[in-house]
Amino acid sequence: MSNRQERASSEIQKCLIEIIQRKMNDPRLRQVISLTEVKVSPDFQFCKVKVSVLDLKEAKNVVNVLQKSEGFIKRELKEMIDLPYMPKFKFEVDKGTASIIQVEEILRNLDIPKEESDDEE
């Protein structure tokens, strides 16, 4: 990825976070933890956004809400940054982060008996 793409991706990521957290009032978006990766294409026509979601059961729903809000997101983004083109967004669940969250949830729910300590001397 070129420096120009990296700078644009980074700026888009910052702006998207602000738009989602401050300007979109959909309660389903409270599940969004972060945008883990934003990659704009070399021609600035497309932008892939990986979304980390707290509740895995709601992940697809959150992505659908974001995808359906693309027009609103583009309008807000256009006011915040100047790009050669306003890219078409593709939102997807970050499966790596989703897997980590799932493993942590499983570990939290395990019923492991505590070991007795050898403090008695």
Image (tube, rainbow, N blue to C red):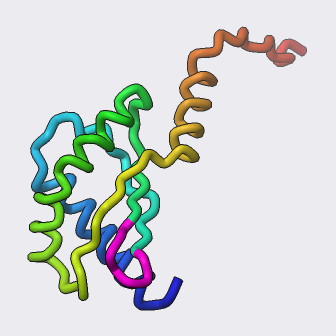
Which residue shows up at 33% across the image and 68% down it? 13
74 up-or-down from 104: above or below:
below
Q: Where is residue 109 in the image (x, y as percent from the top left)?
A: 57, 16
Which residue shows up at 90% across the image and 15% down it? 121
Which residue shows up at 28% across the image and 66% down it? 88
Majority SS type along the magenta span: loop
38 up-or-down from 110: above or below:
below
Query: What span is in magenta?
Result: 41-47
**Image mark count:** 0
Q: Residue furthest right?
A: 121
Image quarter of residue 77: bottom left
105 up-or-down from 29: above or below:
above
Within the magenta stretch, is there residue 35?
A: no
Image quarter of residue 16: bottom left
41 up-or-down from 111: above or below:
below
Q: Position of residue 102 (x, y in %)?
A: 55, 30
Which residue shows up at 43% across the image and 70% down it? 39
Q: Residue 5 or 102: which is nearer the viewer?
A: 5
Left or right of residue 75: residue 110: right
